[in-house]
Amino acid sequence: MSDDKKNDLDEVEQLKEKTMLAHAQRLDEEDRARREAEADLDTDMFDGVRSSDGNPVQPVKIKGSDSFCFSCHKGVSCWNVCCHGADITLTPFDILRLSKGLDIKPAEFLKLFTMPAMWHGADMPVAKLRMSGKDGKGACVFMDEEEGCTVYENRPVNCRYYPLGMAAVKMKGAEGSDDFFFLVKESHCKGHEEDKELSVKDFREEQGVDAYDEQNRGWVEILMKMSSWKVMGGPNGTVVPDKTKQMFFMATTDVELFRKFVFESKFLQTYLVDPELVEELRTDDELLLKLGFDWMKNVLFNDPTIKLRQEVLNDAIGQARENNPRGGG
């Protein structure tokens, strides 16, 4: 392992130990449920698409059973226009699919084809697809002027959805989120003038977005919850440390580095993971992503999505009580 990757794992290991202690210190917080309920504000994950003249597009809310006319093909006069200067946030499953499709490691994919950014609503790090040109208004790095998308089979979910937008909204007090769809009409797009008509449901099936939505659900839930907590200064009213944000970025963008962390650090000695799942995690990248989401929900929000081993929890509680005798009970 390179020194850089070893240092990354060591730093994450140190942060994990601090997180365990913080976890134990929060076990007796009586107002946690109340504060979380107050922070569960309505959250809209719809990314506003902007037209070529810079004015926001007004999306129209539609249901899964509603139909619309749209088709994108070489014969449309706006062919490839939407592939210039696009603001595409890559989901964890996007990165996984694209890396495998290009037969390169996730770390190399991130370096070559993405740029780091912060998710505007949650203040959490994400990877965005790089556009060419000094101002980022040029063509997508995967676009061919004649043939169009060169990674079409593994194209990002945002590209698959267009011209639909999806919003995942969590109402105050609700356990889960509701998904809504929007038909986005930009002034340059002539695909809406085509005769092909299909329902939202049929369009989703045609574009193969179900698998992406399923695999990315945990990641979306984290961003939604972080957006809710942001109005209170962060989870439980505390600012998320930069190291924790680095952990989130690692677990959601680089499955190979996260796998090294799981198997080469004290992760499996710290957390209770089913032995059968442990063996699957050695080769199943999609399962590893889900573990990463569960882990980050626990680290960020103290959610019971992954359990500490009892002996580790007992030690952490004991240390917390030593550090804070009045709060130890």
Image: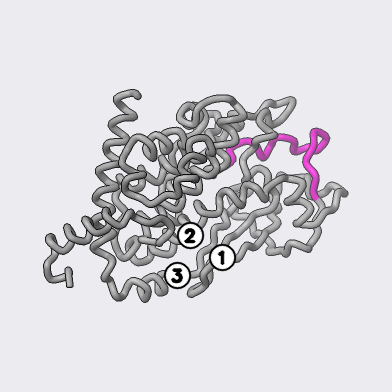
Q: Is residue 281 left or right of residue 328?
A: right
Q: Is residue 102 above or below residue 286?
A: above
Task: Specify the label residue 56 is tagged with.
Answer: none
Question: Which tag, 2 or 3, sits closer to the chain's start?
Answer: 3
Q: Secondary structure at mark 1?
A: loop
Query: Quadrant location of residue 304?
Result: bottom left
Question: Which tag, 1 or 2, sits closer to the chain's start?
Answer: 1
Task: Specify the label residue 177 is tagged with.
Answer: 1
Image point (33%, 23%), residue name: 2
Whole-angstrom CA distance, mark 3 to mark 1, is 11 Å
What range of the chain is rendered magenta?
70-87
Numbered marks: total: 3
Image quadrant holding the C terminus, namely bottom left
Q: Residue furthest front?
A: 275
Q: Which residue is mark 2?
A: 224
Image point (66%, 31%), residue name: 151
Is the Cβ of the residue at disc 2 closer than 8 Å to that at disc 3? no
Q: Secondary structure at mark 3?
A: loop
Q: Nearer the viewer, residue 321 or 79?
A: 321
Majority secondary structure of magenta residues: loop
Task: Specify the label residue 40 is tagged with.
Answer: 3
Q: Is residue 224 left or right of residue 264?
A: right
Query: Quadrant location of residue 91?
Result: top right
- Disc 3 marks a residue whose amino acid type is Asp
